[in-house]
């Protein structure tokens, strides 16, 4: 069963919480402490982009996601969209450089997509797909019924990130 968590978020979660090894079934205890699954949740996923305001506007228009927060401190911008329990956030490349003390590899609509995707769950994949394409998303694959019971489509956003639209798992 496919999990809809960005690769970076998975790495972060695996690095910060106790996990069970698939081969030994021993619990890893970071810093000598074990955390329960209830004490950790995925709060938001951050995409680093050139223009946070434009990315927020695109997702509002293409997918109908409401803006929760936006700030811009002389080009060091950050903003969030409401997406349910987990928020989708955008940070400027400048903010990334300031916080991470290094450059990040930016997505580009002119290059192959990065090895991550954003999955948006909706009961109307075809309708949301059409809305997103009309708003400027690049079509990758049209809505199709999958053998496991979902309808799935793929798009690229204005920054080049891969976006999956899918129905809930049966």
Image: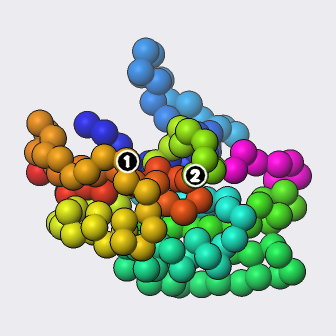
Task: Say if 148 sits above or below 37 in the image.
Answer: above
Residue 109's disc number: 2
* Extreme residue in the top direction: 23
Q: How many marks?
A: 2
Helix, strand or loop at mark 2: loop
Q: Position of residue 95 (x, y in %)?
A: 80, 65
Q: Residues within 10 Å of mark 2 (few under 14, many from 20)?
A: some
Q: Spatial distance from mark 2 to mark 1, Cα to Cα?
A: 12 Å
> In the depicted view, which residue is nearer to us: 33 or 118?
118
Give residue 93's quadrant in the image. bottom right
Q: Position of residue 170 (x, y in %)?
A: 11, 51
Helix, strand or loop at mark 1: strand
Q: Residues within 10 Å of mark 1 (few under 14, many from 20)?
A: few
97 left or right of 162? right
106 left or right of 121? right
Q: Position of residue 156 (x, y in %)?
A: 46, 54
Which residue is drawn at the image coordinates 65% and 83% (left, top)? Answer: 70
> In the depicted view, which residue is nearer to us: 63 or 45?
63
Residue 140's disc number: 1
Question: Mark 2 or 1 closer to N-term?
Answer: 2
């Amino acid at each position: 069963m496919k999990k809809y968590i960005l690769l970076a978020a998975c790495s972060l979660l695996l690095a910060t919480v106790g996990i069970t090894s698939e081969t030994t079934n021993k619990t890893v205890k970071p810093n000598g402490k074990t955390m329960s699954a209830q004490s950790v949740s995925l709060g938001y996923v951050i995409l680093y982009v050139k223009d946070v305001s434009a990315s927020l506007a695109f997702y509002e228009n293409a997918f109908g996601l409401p803006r929760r927060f936006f700030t811009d401190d002389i080009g060091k911008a950050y903003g969030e969209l409401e997406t349910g329990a987990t928020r989708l956030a955008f940070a400027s490349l400048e903010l990334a450089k300031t916080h991470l003390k290094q450059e990040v590899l930016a997505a580009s609509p002119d290059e192959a997509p990065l090895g991550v995707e954003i999955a948006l769950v909706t009961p109307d994949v075809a309708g949301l797909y059409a809305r997103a394409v009309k708003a400027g998303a690049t079509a990758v694959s049209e809505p199709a019924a999958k053998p496991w019971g979902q309808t799935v489509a793929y798009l690229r956003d204005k920054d080049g990130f891969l976006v999956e639209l899918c129905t809930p798992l049966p």
